[in-house]
Amino acid sequence: MKNLLISVLVSGLFVAALPSVGAAAVKLKTMAEKEVIVINDEGEETVTRVAADQIVPGDVIIYTIFYENVGKQPAETVRIVDPIPEEMTYKTGSAESPDVAVLFSVDGGKTMGLMEELRVVEEDGVVRPALASDFTHVMWTLTKPLAPGDGGEVSFRAQLK
Amino acid sequence: MIARRILGAIFLSAVVSSLALAGGTPVCTEIENQAVATYTIGNTTFTETSNKTTTTVAQLIDVSVIWQDAGNVTVRPGQTERILTFMVTNTGNGPDSFTLSVINLLVGDSFDPIFDDIYLDTNGNGVFDVGADELYVAGSNDPLLLADESIVVFSRNSIPGDVESEDLGDSQLVATSNTGTGDPGDSFPHGECDTDIVIGESGGDDEDTGTYVVSSINVMVEKSQEVEDQFGGDEPVPGACIIYTIRVSAVGSGTAAGVIITDEIPEHTTYKEDSLTLNGTELSDLLDGDAGDVGGTTPNTVTVFLGNLDENTPIQTITFAVTIN
């Protein structure tokens, strides 16, 4: 059922946008990293990020999405949507960043809302506030138009179940 | 075209997750991620997708051992092959096999049990069955467990002869991953699907301790008889009836498990049909659902199954009658 909702949403989202694809001015690049502790020459433990090619249950991935306007006109209402992999649980607070509004989805991206406003209907019909583990998608909306040549990054952390 | 590609990616991750287990995402699961941006220039909405990242789930080695008996296992001095029951669970996220061992030289108890052997609960019913359950031989039939799979293991130990009532003896079962052990977080190469093998919180081995308690319980059996002759007197003449009463009680600490009373019908007498009773209730002579029979379990013998007795059990009274030939 959840899968169906995701596909309905995503296809709906992009069918509307399809005619304009190809003239894209905003480029995206996604990275998956994890933190590892390394001991430096002074014998101190330091945290370094490495590519998350492989992880085990309990590990946290940091997903970072770099965006850049490579076109000649400002891009307005820039929204970046990233699905939280179903094997992973969103780490509360990790998606926040300056000059960006963050919304989440608990229904496969069908609807987006503020974390504290989202509700989940349990199988027995009881409605409860959403938990980070309910999140299926995170959406960032830039609060200002993205000028030509400008760019930035957004990121979130999620833990492998 | 783009929409179709995105759909494919999302479906893939959804299908994989349906295999996810409580103990962790299975080894070799591929976790993909792809972001999508929408934006407007003028009145036109545009869409852009990112590259796709792929992360492979590596094998996490973890194991748990939990003692299963409800309480201390009651033993008597000198007993052999007394069973402790443990459950070994592969709490990692991939298949692994485990070496089992028993440690009895532990501090904090009053005696050391003497190791006999380990059996695997081959038929999976949770209790030790002679013949059905397999003797464990290290390196030969180390249990192979899938992620989250468990096996019940029986360790058998003998009890020294010089122990005293209420003495406690601990025995530890250890399960060690054959894939690897180390400190949590250690990793080494050559795992499944070109990933590393990572040691989990258990360090790749785990153990739990079961305890034997020495019981001094004694089952007391007292038998008396009463003769009723056919003339209204109490003379043991041919044709007279002898009513036997057997009183059974337990004295001491612990539980006497599975008490069975047997009594052979005396020579020159004949059992009087339907005379067997337990605590005032008639028991049929046949070997059936009730606690006793005559001649069914053993020819020409009264057998009554009393079950577990301890000091708080009321005195159990068995009666039956015979006729003098």
Image (spheres, grey):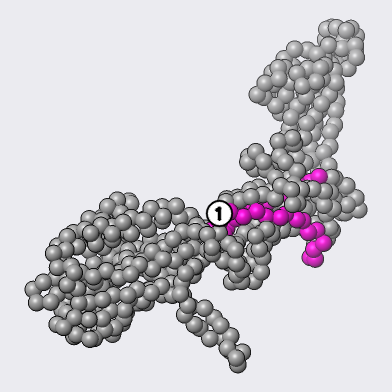
What residue sits 54% from the left and 64% below the top? B195
Q: Quadrant of residue B81?
A: top right
User: Is residue B93 in view?
Assistant: yes
Q: Nearer the viewer, residue B284 or A24?
A: A24
Which residue, given by chain and number where applicable, does mark 1 sit on? Answer: B147
Chain for numbered disc 1: B
**Which residue ends up furthest to the front in the rendered image?**
A22
Q: Write down the quadrant of residue B105 in the picture.
A: bottom right
Tell me the quarter of the picture where residue B265 sits: top right
Side of B27 relative to B233 (left or right): left
Query: Is any atom of residue B206 visible in this view?
Result: no
Residue A75 is situated, as x and y percent measured from the top left of the image, at 17, 79
* Quarter of the N terminus of chain B within the rendering: bottom left
Q: In the displayed orientation, state which residue is furthest to the bottom.
A: A42
State the extent of the magenta-drawn residues as a range: B81-108
Instruction: Say if B25 sits above or below A94 in the image.
Output: above
**x then y, percent, for residue B85:** 70, 49
Amino acid type indicated by mark 1: Ala
Residue at image coords 19%, 85%: A148
Along the viewing direction, whichever of A145 and B162 lies nearer the viewer? A145
Name the residue rendered at 65%, 57% in the picture: B65
